[in-house]
């Protein structure tokens, strides 16, 4: 079995200014074609450091994939480091220079002199063409190992990897095939899912089943390894069926599907429409729905009624009701959903009211308390939730990256839960 | 000068299932106290691999900070790897075991037998207490170098690092001080900012000035190094003043401030209110505004009028006007802002209409065309933008992480631009 090692190059990665997503992307893609990544290095823009890490990585793997440091400025030295490591020289490639010049000409720009350096690659290496930018990639075999240097800009790296590198690697990785599937679940915690599916998550099992959690979405990864593709696919298929049986309606989708996509597809297929009335989520629910391309087929109206006055005036929620039960109550979330559905003349409406915090909570109504209602033609459903950034969430690992603190987490969990309640009615 | 090396431990990091944010966090924090990170390694949950990387890292740095692999399950082997590398044994620490047991008792839970392993640390090492979970950290000196092993769960790692590690390191890093400042800018591109500030971004300058871009927000990092804190602060201060002079009103804030925070502070201070009417941004603008704690002081009403009917019925935009100019036009964005301000009885309103794509564009009205209006008591301002996922955006580096594709980018850029237009009126 071939093994890979990954190198991420750039001072900005060492100083913590940028989080490299390239390594994770490359790992996942390599893994999917049966090439496990056995080590990963981050190194600054320095010829000797890069050359050292190239040596370390080639001790670990048969395929060494580097990204970054191919730009036109003086701090981009991956080219030089490769040449140094191979013990060769950089050589101008006329065809590459022509291509880079064309890149600028097409955009009515003059090629800056500095850019010319990108047309140099080590003697004996092959250039990988860049369809989205000026930096060519580099591919070379050296002492029986395959070395790839890709641009650091994620879009360019991905395009080059998918179009030019992956086909070559797939052809080489003939000894075994890995098929992966993802099942997306919503509506319970990671440990509850683990209990429902029993002992299948143990290490060494084939297919391997892993579980990750992010913002309440639980993803089950099925990784089947076999000698040929059809066997691996059958194994993954069988496990998917088994998991679906255990988890029932907790499973909302597969692959990269989001809850909003699945709900949107169902609405579009049934030719139904949805309106939303949000208080504490302040637009998060409407955003999730309209993140999906073509959402205008089923989504027409959203209200962000952040103040009581807005709830009363824009939605027609009764001022007495707010007075009597408070704005954060099942009565008000229901009234918001009912009124929004009526005003928008929609088939469904979701109403959300709660306390996102960090302040504004009390003993009776703590931060994280959220009422969510789904109103439909025949009936209205309201549920009470307390979303907490407690130990249960913290142990989800790295999954709060990109969400700053509890307030954002509560808002997102509430909006997703609203979508999930609607999904179960569709 | 002391130097650090970072090790991220976990199979999930090598398989690409999880993007480690710990390394970036640690880098930035170490850098801020004058300890540059010179290398960073990612390694799987394997005793020999971790021991090897501990050796590599201790070749690079004086301080080695590892995170991950301290959990209670069989795949958590960082403890064993440290003991192996130090050539020592693991030893049960009664005080630690007591603490871990208490963690469960307080939560009315029984400690699982497996958890006991977390109370073992290498002979001669010191435990770091975990205030948020069960996994203690480990600190040890070996051959003149300082080794730290922290939990992989970001919240636990951060708490332990800030409370117990940083004070110790700060005391040790006496030979020089690094002061960093961030200036946040909005309203032009990265290259335009670079031109405005002239040659100060060159390498080797002190303070060092770096520029990063994310979703249209340009951040200038000022990094001043000096023998003492007051000198470094004065140097950073002088550069901040110089940059502010060059950039004028492009600078909207400092540190981690978002546009929505700055706009919110101004509104709250001036006791003004804001309403929004969104079409293509579909709730993104309301979300950005309500991401800020206490937004209810100035934000009361938002409309997501995704359909023409919603614009007409809910906002009272004239059907004739839509018929005549189309929903994506300066007339409609202005009407949306004017009507929203009136209905909400707000001091300001922002109206946004455009084509977020990927479909729905035409030659006259391409994907990315967005009209944004800010209506105020005295006057109304409308601007036309074309937001593109062109080369200019792609070359921003890793900054599209978390934003899937062009549609989301256009929506976010439009909402931020609306906030920026309002900022310039406040």
Image (cartoon, coloured by chain):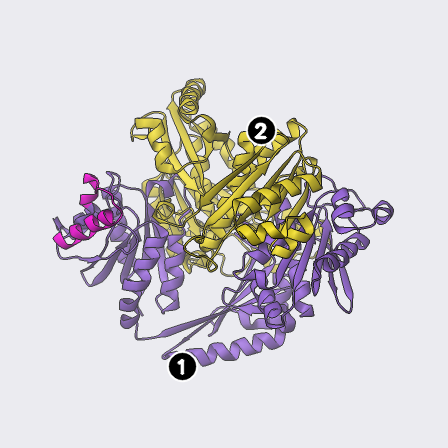
Chain colours: A yellow, B purple
How busy is the neighbourhood of tag 2: few (under 14 within 10 Å), some, or many (20 plus)? Answer: few
- Residue ID for mark 2: A426
- The answer to whether residue A205 is left or right of residue B24 is left
Q: Chain of mark 2?
A: A
- Residue ID for mark 1: B230
- Foreground mark, 2 or 1, reads 2
User: Majority secondary structure of the magenta segment?
Assistant: helix
Whole-percent x and y of residue A9?
A: 44, 52
Answer whether residue B376 is visible to the viewer in this image: yes
Q: Residue at x 41, y 32 (%)?
A: A221
Q: Residue at x 64, y 71 (%)?
A: B249
Quadrant of image for the N terminus of chain A = top left
Residue A381 placement: quadrant:
top right
Depicted A408 relative to depicted B145: above or below: above
Q: Quick one: SS at disc 1? A: helix
In front of the other: A354 or A186? A354
Q: Residue at x 41, y 18 (%)?
A: A231
In front of the other: B20 or B142? B20
Q: Is residue A362 magenta?
A: no
Q: Which residues are magenta?
A: B93-117
């Amino acid at each position: 079995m071939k093994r890979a090692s990954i190198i991420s190059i750039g001072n900005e990665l060492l100083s913590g200014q940028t989080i490299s997503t390239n390594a994770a992307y490359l790992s996942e893609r390599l893994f999917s074609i049966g090439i496990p990544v056995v080590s990963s290095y981050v190194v600054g823009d320095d010829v000797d450091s890069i050359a050292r890490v190239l040596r370390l990585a080639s001790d670990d793997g048969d395929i060494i994939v580097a990204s970054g440091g191919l730009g036109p400025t003086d701090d981009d030295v991956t080219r030089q480091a490769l040449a140094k490591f191979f013990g060769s020289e950089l050589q101008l490639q006329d065809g590459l220079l022509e291509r880079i010049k064309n890149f600028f000409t097409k955009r009515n720009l003059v090629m800056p002199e500095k850019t010319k350096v990108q047309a140099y690659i080590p003697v004996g290496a092959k250039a990988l063409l860049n369809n989205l930018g000026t930096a060519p990639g580099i591919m070379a075999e050296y002492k029986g190992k395959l070395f790839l240097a890709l641009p650091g800009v994620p879009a360019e790296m991905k395009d080059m990897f998918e179009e030019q590198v992956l086909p070559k690697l797939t052809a080489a990785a003939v000894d075994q095939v890995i098929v992966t599937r993802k099942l997306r679940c919503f509506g319970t915690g990671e440990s509850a899912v683990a209990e429902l599916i029993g002992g299948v998550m143990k290490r060494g099992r084939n297919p391997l089943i892993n579980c990750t959690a992010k913002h309440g979405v639980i993803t089950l990864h099925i990784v089947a390894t076999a000698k040929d593709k059809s066997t691996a696919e059958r194994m993954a298929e069988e496990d998917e069926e088994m998991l679906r049986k255990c988890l029932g309606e907790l499973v909302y989708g597969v692959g990269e599907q989001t809850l909003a996509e699945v709900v949107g597809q169902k609405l579009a297929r049934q030719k139904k429409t949805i309106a939303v009335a949000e208080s504490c989520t302040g637009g998060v629910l409407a955003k999730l729905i309209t993140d999906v391309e073509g959402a205008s087929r089923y989504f027409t109206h959203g209200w962000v009624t952040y103040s009581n006055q807005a709830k009363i005036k824009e939605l027609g929620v009764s001022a007495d009701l707010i007075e009597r039960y408070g704005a954060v109550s099942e009565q008000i979330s229901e009234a918001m959903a009912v009124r929004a559905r009526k005003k928008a003349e929609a088939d469904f409406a979701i109403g959300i009211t709660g306390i996102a915090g960090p302040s504004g909570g009390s003993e009776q109504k703590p931060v994280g308390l959220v009422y969510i209602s789904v109103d439909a033609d025949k009936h209205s459903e309201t549920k009470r939730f307390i979303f907490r950034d407690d130990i249960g969430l913290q142990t989800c690992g790295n999954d709060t990256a990109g969400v700053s603190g509890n307030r954002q987490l509560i808002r997102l969990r509430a909006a997703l839960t609203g979508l999930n309640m609607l999904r179960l009615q569709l």
